[in-house]
Amino acid sequence: MPDDNRAKKLRRADLERITAAVSEAEARTSAEIVTVVASQSGSYTGQVLLVCLAAMAAYSVLYFVFMGFVQKFLALFLWHVHPVNLLFVFVSGQVLFFGLAFGLLSFFPRLRRGVVSGKDRNARVRLRAESAFYRYNVTATGAGNGLLLYISLFERRVELLVDSGIAARVKNETWQDVVDGIVSGIREGRFVPAVESAVARCGAVLAGPFPRRQGDVNELPDKPVVE
C-alpha cells in the first residue's frame, strides 16, 4: 500500500535550506539540532483492512435486502436466473467494494488519516521519534545538549525531544511554540519555511544556556534525515 511519501519528494533545494538553517542556528550555540522528516510513522494497515471489511459487510447486507431487485435486473439479461448467477453477483460485489475501499484509502491520505484515531497516530509518532532519538545519536553529545525535531507528515505531528543537559536548563513548555509552528506549516503548505523558523527559534533558545564557544565542534550532521 503506497504511503504519503511527501518527505521523499522534498527537493534538494529544500533539504539544503533546512541544512543551512541548522548550521546558522548552531553558529549561536554549542547544542546540536537534528531534524528528521518522515513520510509517516505507521502503515495503519489494520485500520484500513477493518474499513474495507466494513464496506464489504455493508454491501452484503444491502444485497440480501434488495435481492428481489437483483433478480429482476438479472432477468433482463438471462432466460433463467440460476442460484449460481446470484452467488456470482454477490461475491463479485464483495470483491468490488473491498477493492474500492482499499484503493481509496491507499491513494488518498486524507481519507486514510480519517479512519485512524488521533490517539493511535500520536502514539505511533511518539514511538518513532523516541527510536530516532537514539538511532541518530542525539544522545551522543558531550554536554548532553542534543535536540531532535521529528516531523511526521502524514500524521501532521511533530515531536521535539531533548537530551538531559537541555532538559535540566530549559523548561519543556518552551518548545510548544516551535512544535505548533511546524504543524501549522504542514497544514498551510509552507513546510520548509516553518521548519526554518522553528530551527532558528531552537537556536535562539539554546544560545542562552549553551552559548557557542571557541573550539566547539559540530558533533552531529546538520543535514536533515529523510525517512
Image (cartoon, rainbow, N blue to C red):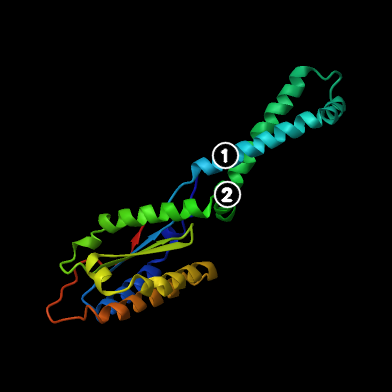
Which residue occupies 60% across, 42% down?
Answer: 51
Q: How crowded is mark 1: few (under 14 residues within 10 Å), some or many (20 or more)?
A: few
Q: In the figure, residue 216 lies in which quadrant?
A: bottom left
The answer to whether the residue labelled 2 contacts the one labelled 1, judged by CB atoms less than 8 Å apart, is: yes
Residue 50 tag number: 1
Q: Position of residue 164 (x, y in %)?
A: 23, 65
Q: Where is residue 204 in the image (x, y as percent from the top left)?
A: 31, 81
Q: What element carries label 1?
A: helix
Q: Distance between the residues labelled 2 and 1?
A: 9 Å
Which residue occupies 15% across, 67% down?
Answer: 142
Q: In the figure, residue 74 lies in which quadrant?
A: top right
Q: Is residue 204 left or right of residue 52?
A: left
Residue hosting label 2: 115
Amino acid type of the residue tagged 2 in the rendering: Val
Q: What element carries label 2?
A: loop
Q: Is residue 49 left or right of residue 210?
A: right
Amino acid type of the residue tagged 1 in the rendering: Leu
Q: How crowded is mark 2: few (under 14 residues within 10 Å), some or many (20 or more)?
A: some
Q: Position of residue 21 (x, y in %)?
A: 33, 76
Q: Is residue 67 left or right of residue 208?
A: right
Which residue is at the front of the view, 81 or 138? 138
Which residue is at the front of the view, 206 or 1? 206
Q: In this view, does 140 lie to the left or right of 111?
A: left
Q: Position of residue 76 (x, y in %)?
A: 87, 28
- From what the image shows, is residue 129 above or below residue 78? below
